[in-house]
Image (cartoon, grey):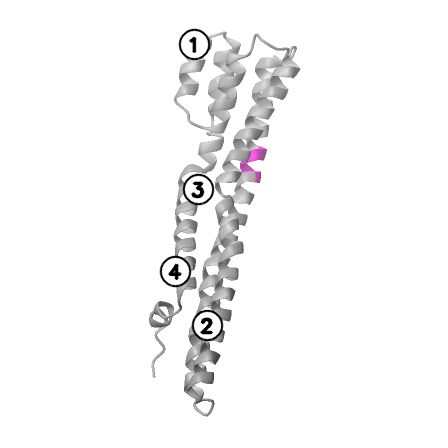
Amino acid sequence: MQFNFFQQLAAGGAGIWVIAALSVLAIAVALERFHRFRPAAVVPPALADEVVPLWQAGRFDELEQALVKHDSVFARTLRFLVAHRSRWSAEVLAARAGEVASRSLRAQQQRAYPLAVVATVAPIVGLLGTVVGMIEAFHVIAFTGGMGDASLLAGGISKALVNTAAGLAVALPSLALHHFFRHRLVTCGLALEEQLEHVLDACVRPGSH
């Protein structure tokens, strides 16, 4: 007899539907992160090289217009620098800009957090579905007196274990994606710090240019 995994899933009970909903959530979050959390969306290449000459020439109107065109963490941080360039000292301004960049990066990290939730919850739901399925299987055996019929027990256990398999199948890629985006966050954070320091040294800190 050919094993039909999709039929087993359909017979897996309520746990399968919960796992399916978690898989949809994981896919939606992953697609959004791949689209919105690209390195260019955090630190656009060559933006610092565009900003520094305009700042040093005092062409702040052009600088603000150039930054508005970029919807990135780095651009928002630079807009903060430009808007508050006369309000604080160079060191205070640098510290505040670092805080702005840090908050933006934490917000990016938080948007990937549902992947960690799915990776944690999906296998637990699968295990719960397996336990419930095993209880139902033994319940059927107890009330039908079918201990001599191994097919009754094996069929129930097979359906129950499908829950665990489905939970793990959703949890493993979700966990992998969560760590992937954490690695991307660290990489982009280092690039952002480097580019921000370049702008601060060239434009904000006294005696740097």
- Disc on res. 61: 1
Identify the image quadrant of the N terminus: bottom left
Question: Which numbered disc, 3 or 2, marks the residue closer to the eye?
Answer: 2
**Other residues around mark 2 within 10 Å, as few (<14) / some (14–19) / many (≥20):** many
Who's the residue at 51% across and 70% down the image?
131
Q: Which amino acid does label 2 sit on?
A: Gly
SS type, badge 4? helix
Q: Which amino acid does label 3 sit on?
A: Arg
Q: Is residue 57 above or below residue 108?
A: above
Residue at the disc numbered 2: 133
**Other residues around mark 3 within 10 Å, as few (<14) / some (14–19) / many (≥20):** some
Q: Residue furthest bottom?
A: 148
Residues at discs 2 and 4 in contact (Cβ within 8 Å): no
Q: Which amino acid does label 4 sit on?
A: Trp
Magenta-colored span? 186-190
The quadrant holding residue 91 is top right
Q: Considering only order in the chain, which callout, 4 or 2, is on the residue closer to the N terminus?
A: 4
Along the horizontal axis of the image, is 153 left or right of 209? left
3D distance between C-alphas at marks 4 and 1: 55 Å
Residues at discs 3 and 2 in contact (Cβ within 8 Å): no
Residue at the disc numbered 3: 33
Along the horizontal axis of the image, is 208 left or right of 188? right
- Residue 89 location, x and y as percent? 64, 11
3D distance between C-alphas at marks 1 and 2: 67 Å
Between 6 and 185, the one lying in front of the other is 6
Q: In this view, does 32 lie above or below 199?
A: below
- Disc on res. 17: 4
The quadrant holding residue 185 is top right
Give the main secondary structure of the magenta stretch. Answer: helix
